Every structure is written in structure tokens, then in C-alpha cells.
Amino acid sequence: MWEKQSRHFDPERKPGEAISGLPRPFQGLAMTLVGLTLAVFLPTFAQADFPRPWQIYYQDPVTPVMQIIYDFHLELLTIEGLIVLMVAGLLVYVIVRFRASRNQTPSKVAHNTVLEILWTTLPVLILVYIAFPSFKLLYMMDVTPKSDLTIKAIGNQWYWTYEYPDHDIKFDSNIITEDKLQPGGKRLFEVDNRVIVPTNTNIRVITTSSDVLHSWAVPAFGVKRDSVPGRLNETWFNVKKEGVYYGQCSELCGVKHAFMPIVVQAVPKAQFDQWIASKKSAPQTHKGG
């Protein structure tokens, strides 16, 4: 279903090597501008699947949706940068060309039809150019394709409960406190039970809440969906790269809002099947709350 929408995704490509929808002559200029910006303003910038100290830009995209979000954002930055340069150039030109020392007698011209048409038409054309990929991306994010696995994420104060309805599995996922953190563990991000998913699989996530508003969000997936009491919201992702990916509840849900991490581990299909079998044979860890 998503072959056309995700045609720009390449798991072997480093983020930013191509900018979807941007004419080829501008791609080099765009990447130069972005590279200079990052070099100047983000000296500690590094791609990651989890937050790093002083990180400002996106995490490394690992799903088709997030890859397109990443590329589209770079394209928008390029367009915005060119607009800023053009306006700054016009300001400098006006300041120099029409300074008082050079124009003792100010011009009384109040209208220029050609200029007025240009500065009205050009922004409209830019907005139309941006609108088409925006609508396409919004549709891709909102409409779940045919899924091979369904996971239900239930927000509680302050932990997550996960269900795999197709496999009759249910467990809680709580933060690992700092005093119990293993060497190399990530403070405020590690949990006692990770969500395990297979790679290259369309996964539907249904989310709700048992108490207040929560939000299930994993930045590397391009996923953020509110968990609302009494309502089922839906999102999806397809992880193309094995690894461990971190997120957090992204809705203010109370005093321990900052202590509801989300950890998703993407593994090969065979390893996922083994995990499913082990979970079915082990005692359920869901305690309710």
C-alpha cells in the first residue's frame, strides 16, 4: 500500500543524503547549507536512536514515515533559508541603494504593479509546492496499512501496560530506577520489560489510557499518539533496522510524567518468534493498577 509513499526510504542511506522532492541542482546547495548550519550551531551533533546530551536535531530515522519527515524537514529548512537570504539581500540593497546621502530627493512612487504581483504570487506558489508533500505525509501517518502485528499500549500513572492480542500476551513496563541501573544503562530511559517487535513488519499500535491523558511516542519511528481514557487511538510503524529505540510519555500526566519511558527493541523475525514462545510459557507480569 505504501510503496509509492515510502519510495525514498533506504535503510542503508545516511539521513540527509537525498532530499525528497527537491530538484537535483538544489540538493548540493541544500546539504551545504545544512552542513554549515550543523557545523556552526551543533558541534556535538550525532545521529542516534536515543537522546544524547545537547542533541537538538532529529534522531536517526528507522521507519519509512520518519525518513520522509526527516527529508521533508531538510527541504523546508532549505526553502526557509533561501527566503531569509533573499529578504536579507533585499534589505541590504534597499539600505545601500536608497540611503539619504544618495537620494536627496525621495521618490514619490507608491505602487509597482509587477512587484506587487510577484510578492503576492511567489509566496502562494511556495505554499502550494509545500502543501502537496505535506498532505501526502499526513495521510501516510494517519492511515494504517494492512498490519501483520497489533500491539495495545495502555497508559497508567506512571507506567505502560502492553498487550499482544494476537498472541494472548500482556505485561507491564516500568522504569528502572537509577539505583538499579546496569552499567551502560540510560538514566530515565531503561525499563524492566521492553516491547519486542520484528523488523520489516507493519505493526499497528492501539493506545488508550486507564486514568489520565498519556502519549505514546518514539522519535526514531516518527510516532506520537495520545492515549485517551475511554478512547482507542491508532498509529503504525515499520522498523527497517535492528536495534533498541527509546521514547517517553509525551503528555503531561502528573507528578511522575518524566518517569514513563518507552523502549522498543526491533529484532529479526525468528528471534521475535522465540520471544513470543518464551513469553507464552512464562508467568504473566501484568499486575494491573
Image: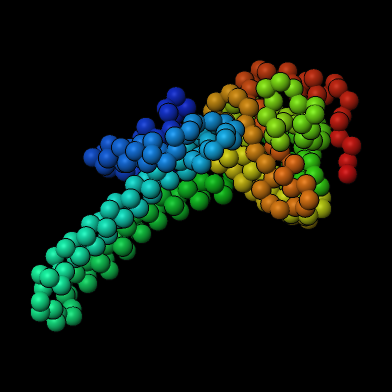
Return the residue nearer the eye: 198 or 104.
Answer: 104
Please provide percent x and percent y for residue 267.
Answer: 63, 22
Color scheme of the displayed model: rainbow
Residue at 80% across, 20% down: 278
Residue at 58% across, 40% down: 219
Q: Residue furthest front?
A: 101
Instruction: In the rendered view, tell whether residue 200 sits above or below residue 224.
Output: above
Residue at 71% across, 36% down: 188
Instruction: In the rendered view, tell whether residue 231 sits above or below residue 7.
Output: below
Quadrant of image for the C terminus: top right
Instruction: In the rendered view, tell whether residue 265 sits above or below residue 140.
Output: above
Quadrant position of residue 235: top right
Please provide percent x and percent y for residue 147.
Answer: 62, 37
In the rendered structure, the answer to whether residue 244 lies left or right of residue 60 reads right
Quadrant position of residue 262: top right
Please provide percent x and percent y for residue 193.
Answer: 77, 29
Q: Total number of numbered labels? A: 0
Residue 24 seen from this side = yes
Residue at 38% across, 36% down: 39
Return the residue nearer the eye: 160 or 136.
Answer: 160
Residue 236 seen from this side = no
Quadrant position of residue 113: bottom left
Please provide percent x and percent y for residue 51.
Answer: 59, 35
Return the residue nearer the eye: 47 or 263.
Answer: 47
